[in-house]
Image: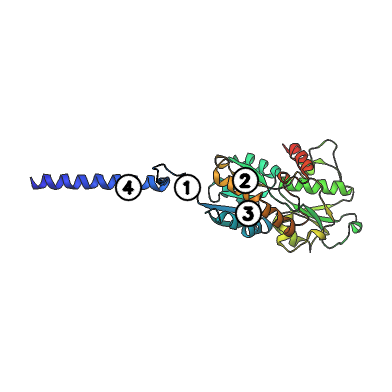
């Protein structure tokens, strides 16, 4: 009899512990909304309170640290930033859930990368972007270009295409008629008018390559993070197709936290900061500046 009583007591206690554990899990996943004086529930707090950003080193990370992080913290979020030194890991880290949002790439690169790696990620909003530029290396003027001059350029397909288009516009080489400038490759060179020796490198290495080549085509973010200035460029691409975008996992695109980030990047405070800190950059179409050029370029890239 005592054994039966003990067993019933133990079973009841175990059941209570199990129910408490399940209830605890449910509470952690979705906190119950407190009731107000009238007995009605208030709106539930955002399910997500920590946001992990991923950017390349330099201007995009500075934007988060200087403006976006403080703005989101005022709304109750905890913000963390991971800065990458390449163009590959940020998208993989996003797809794998290591970060929640990344900011470093233009749409042609994003479209190509997610198709190649079968990633379910998508663009959300544009950010101020330093244009791709041709910078002096061992030679300091465009007039100094000579037969056989060397030019370092980013080795990823979309940015390499940009470099080819720049050299085509400079008259250093000629691209085939009718090619898509967003996907131009070496196979699209009809004539190398200056016998340019193109040295393909990881984008992060381009600033340092200037000591070894005559000219360097450098991505804006790496130019800025290396202490280079837009005023140093000998030539800048005119296209607006490469204004950079943020990206998130597609399932998160309509989340409240994504809307809050978008609002922070399009706020008057951020616009004023960007125009002072990043003068000479190309701005998002949503800001209403250069909108026609950006919209046309964006349509051409789709």
Would you say 22 lies left or right of 180 here?
A: left
Of the two numbered discs 4 and 2 on the same chain, state the one appearing first in sequence. Answer: 4
Nearest to the eye among marks 1 and 2: give it: 1
- Residue highlighted by disc 3: 55
Of the two numbered discs 1 and 2 on the same chain, state the one appearing first in sequence. Answer: 1
Q: Confirm or deny contact between disc 3 and disc 4 (CB under 8 A).
A: no
Q: Confirm or deny contact between disc 1 and disc 4 (CB under 8 A).
A: no
Q: How far apart, in angstroms, are the residues tagged by discs 3 and 1?
A: 27 Å
Nearest to the eye among marks 3 and 4: give it: 4
Q: Secondary structure at mark 1?
A: loop
Q: Quadrant of the N terminus?
A: top left
Q: Confirm or deny contact between disc 3 and disc 2 (CB under 8 A).
A: no
| Front residue of 157 and 120 | 120
10 Å crowding of disc 4: few (<14), some (14-19), many (20+): few
Of the two numbered discs 3 and 4 on the same chain, state the one appearing first in sequence. Answer: 4
- Residue highlighted by disc 4: 21
Q: Measuring 82% from the left and 60% from the top, which residue is drawn there?
A: 231
Which disc is residue 247 wearing? Answer: 2
């Amino acid at each position: 009899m005592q054994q039966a009583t003990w067993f019933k007591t133990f079973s009841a206690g175990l059941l209570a512990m199990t129910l408490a554990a399940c209830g605890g899990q449910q509470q952690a996943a979705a906190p119950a909304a407190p009731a107000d004086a009238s007995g009605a529930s208030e709106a539930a707090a955002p399910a997500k309170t920590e946001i992990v950003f991923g950017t390349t080193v330099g201007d995009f990370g500075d934007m988060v640290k200087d403006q976006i992080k403080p703005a989101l913290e005022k709304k109750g979020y905890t913000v963390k930033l991971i800065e990458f030194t390449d163009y590959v890991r940020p998208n993989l880290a996003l797809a794998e859930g290591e970060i929640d949002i990344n900011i470093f790439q233009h749409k042609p690169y994003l479209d190509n990368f997610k198709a190649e790696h079968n990633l379910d990620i998508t663009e959300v909003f544009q950010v101020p972007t330093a244009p791709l530029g041709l910078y002096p290396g061992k030679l300091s003027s465009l007039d100094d270009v000579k037969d056989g001059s060397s030019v370092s350029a980013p080795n990823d397909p979309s940015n390499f295409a940009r470099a080819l288009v720049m050299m085509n516009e400079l008259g250093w080489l000629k691209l085939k008629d009718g090619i898509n400038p967003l996907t131009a490759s070496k196979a699209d060179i009809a004539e190398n008018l200056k016998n340019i020796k193109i040295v393909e490198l990881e984008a992060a290495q381009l600033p340092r390559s200037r000591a070894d080549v005559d000219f360097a085509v450098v991505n804006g973010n790496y130019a800025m993070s290396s202490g280079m200035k837009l005023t140093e460029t000998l030539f800048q691409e005119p296209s607006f197709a490469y204004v950079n975008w943020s990206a998130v996992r597609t399932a998160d695109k309509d989340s409240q936290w994504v809307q809050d980030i978008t609002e922070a990047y399009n706020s008057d405070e951020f616009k004023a900061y960007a125009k002072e800190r990043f003068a000479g950059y190309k701005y998002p179409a949503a800001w209403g500046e250069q909108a026609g050029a950006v919209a046309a370029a964006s349509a051409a890239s789709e």
